[in-house]
Amino acid sequence: MAETAFFIYFAALTLFSSVLTVGLRNPVYCSLALLSTLLHVAGLFVLLQAEFIAALQVIVYAGAVLVLYIFVLMLLNIKTAEDFVHKQVWIALFFGVVLILEILIGLFQSPLFSSSPKTPTQTTPSIGNTAEIGIALFTEYLLPFEIVGIILLGAVIGALVLAKKVPTAS
Amino acid sequence: MIPLTYYVTVSTLMFVVGLMGILIRKNFLIILFAIELMLNAANINLVAFSRHYGEVDGQVISLFIITIAAAEAAVGLAIIIVLFRKKAITNVDELNLMKW
């Protein structure tokens, strides 16, 4: 009962904030709406008993990625434009509705959803979510973990090289 | 227990909202925000299926996705900063040359 109430709140606020993120005129308001979206998605993760991913979402996504976006937003001092959507916005929204209906109809026809709701094969885990993820990350997913580290290194080097001011040779 | 279909519906709606954001907005930063929305929708989907099947693999993959999104944000913003140094425009329609 309480879980359903929390789910309705988090899901509704997630969708509402995401619509605001793409729909508001001022980019700073859009970034605040994105912050709200990310925090409510973290709430959805908590409802799914994935507390580690929820904490990671708040710390990394809302706390680092979004702050980086807001830094650049303030640095570039982007003004609110008068025309902020393309002219074909209504065609795009129409096709968006069509796409939603298509995906949902396709999903609900599939045997995954139309079968009788089987109880999920989960028992309350004896170890916490963090330990579960840690065990999987360092045994089965060790190679992707190392590769993601190298990707992060590449991103750091790439961002530095790109944004470095080249001294003009005079 | 919230059924899986609810989470997948939320994920689908958020994904299409992000897709529409990429298609209709002219400001490149809002396009990047919409890309983050799509990545978060995929994350919700992965974690919901992971909890449905009782495995933890979906959550590990969503951890990787969060990390990759951070890396992509850094590099994308570096590109925008370099572009903005040459020409102070924010409209993606006007950023139409390969080299400034």
Image (cartoon, rainbow, N blue to C red):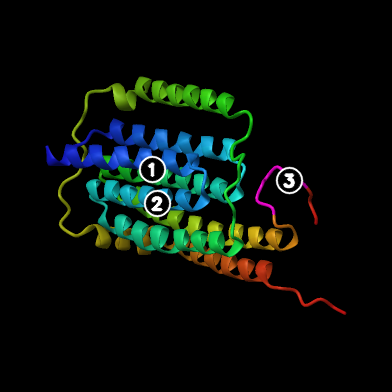
In the rendered structure, the answer to whether residue A23 lies left or right of residue A11 reads: right
Q: Which mark is residue A17?
A: 1
Q: Subunit of mark 1?
A: A
Instruction: Look at label 3 and name its amino acid.
Output: Glu
| On-image quarter of the N terminus of chain A | top left
Instruction: In the displayed orientation, state which residue is furthest to the bottom.
Output: A170
- Label 3 crowd (10 A; few <14 / some 14-19 / many >=20): few
> Marks 2/1: CA distance?
21 Å
Q: Is residue B13 above or below residue B48?
A: above
In the rendered structure, the answer to whether residue B96 lies left or right of residue A31 reads: right
Q: Find residue B74 and report its image quarter.
A: bottom right
Q: Is residue A133 above or below residue B3?
A: below
Which of label 3 and label 2 is nearer to you?
3
Identify the residue at horizontal 46%, vertical 36% (top origin). B17
Identify the residue at horizontal 56%, vertical 46% (top origin). B31
Q: Is residue B7 above or below residue B78?
A: above
Which residue has dot 3 on it? B94
Segment tinted magenta in the rendering: B89-96
Which of label 2 and label 1 is nearer to you?
1
- Label 2 crowd (10 A; few <14 / some 14-19 / many >=20): many
Q: Is residue A168 visible?
A: yes
In the image, residue A110 lies at what x, y percent?
37, 23
SS assignment at label 2: helix
Which residue has dot 2 on it? B62
In the image, residue B91 lies at what x, y percent?
67, 46
Reply yes or no: does residue A56 show up in magenta. no
Q: Earlier in the sequence, mark 3 or mark 2?
A: 2
Q: Are dots 2 and 1 in contact, CB under 8 Å? A: no
